[in-house]
Image (spheres, helix red, strand yellow):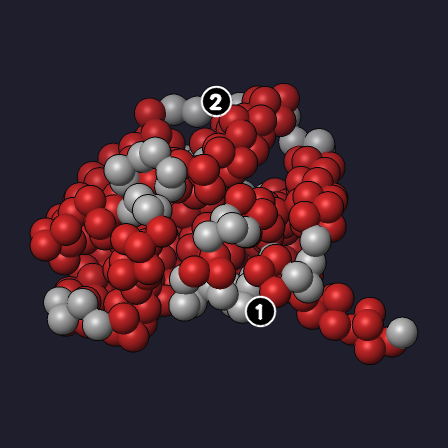
Amino acid sequence: MKMNIAHKLDAWEKLMRLDKPIGILLLLWPTLWGLWAGGGGMLPHPWVVWIFVLGTVLMRSAGCVVNDWADRKFDGHVARTRERPMVTGAVSSFEALGLATILVVCAFLLILPLNRLVIWLSFPALLLAIIYPFTKRFLAIPQAFLGIAFSFGIPMAFAALQEQVPWQAWALVLGNTFWTIAYDTEYAMVDRPDDLKIGIRTSAITFGRFDVRAVMICYALFLLIMAGLGVNQHYGVVYFCALAIAAGIAAYHYVLIRGRQREECFRAFQHNNWLGATVFAGMVVDHAVRHWAEYPMYLRWLS
């Protein structure tokens, strides 16, 4: 019995991708950008940060469960996904839907202490997360839809801090959408041969022989928007140095993906964690340099 429980917990962990946290991190970085950019020069309250961090983990986990439920008839035909729990039968459809429901309810309970605007924004955020897995059936570039879904923590963060969603939040959403298209196209390049066989649509297929060029254009647009946001927010040299490092990371990804080898494309995708972390570090350090007196008390709150 103990072994059965252990196997079931392991299957649920894999279904939620908790054993592969890269997706959580790629969702978390733009949410944290929103919290720091939305503060208008003020640090976000530590409790708000924790709510958004935990909410990101819960919603990313729920999104993975819904994605695997939606793709349960396709994943067995893709080399990278044929061992997923719903394909092997380790988790049933009923269990998956129940688990997704529990995760979504927990995430919703987390935001109840925040203002009404955040709560209202959570509904389109949930709708986007549910719809995304099905967009691969009919959208030429479903990665753009994923980018919007992965960006909804940004307006929610601004709403939590300002009780409004200014244009800067939507500019950040646009920038993050370009970044998402870039890294998820790298991800799609890994599965392109299998996706072509089963009829799934992806940006890697739509861009065709221009895939590498499209990825780099999306990186460039992302960095330009982030630079414009930095000018608008009066960020200093530290932030722009971080963007320069992020540009260097993007250039390294070109080296990895230009040969279109599966392993190298997947390496580039995973490496985007460092790009997102670099931009966030630039925001935090730049803010700390300009408002250093606030940080000792803030660090005590976090601990």
SS at badge 2: loop
Say whether residue 26 is visible: yes
Q: Amino acid at mark 1?
A: Asp
Apparent side of residue 75 relative to residue 261 in the rendered image (left or right): right
Apparent side of residue 273 relative to residue 296 in the rendered image (left or right): left
Task: Give coordinates of residue 166: x percent, y percent.
Answer: 38, 24
Apparent side of residue 66 relative to residue 257 in the rendered image (left or right): right
Task: Give coordinates of residue 89: x percent, y percent.
Answer: 66, 61
Apparent side of residue 300 relative to residue 224 in the rendered image (left or right): right
Q: Amino acid at mark 2?
A: Gln
Task: Give coordinates of residue 161: x percent, y percent.
Answer: 53, 33
- Of residue 140 and residue 161, the one placed in the foreground of this image is 140
Q: Residue at x 29, y 75 (%)?
A: 263
In this view, the mark in front (1 or 2)? 1
Q: Residue at x 14, y 57 (%)?
A: 212
Say whether residue 157 is visible: no
How far separated are the C-alphas under marks 1 and 2?
A: 36 Å
Q: Which residue position is annotated with label 1?
A: 19
Task: Give coordinates of residue 172: x percent, y percent.
Answer: 33, 37
Q: Is residue 166 above or below residue 62?
A: above
- Of residue 264 and residue 31, the one placed in the foreground of this image is 264
Q: Which residue position is annotated with label 2?
A: 164
Residue count near mark 2 (Cα–Cα under 10 Å), binned few <14, some 14–19, many ≥20: some
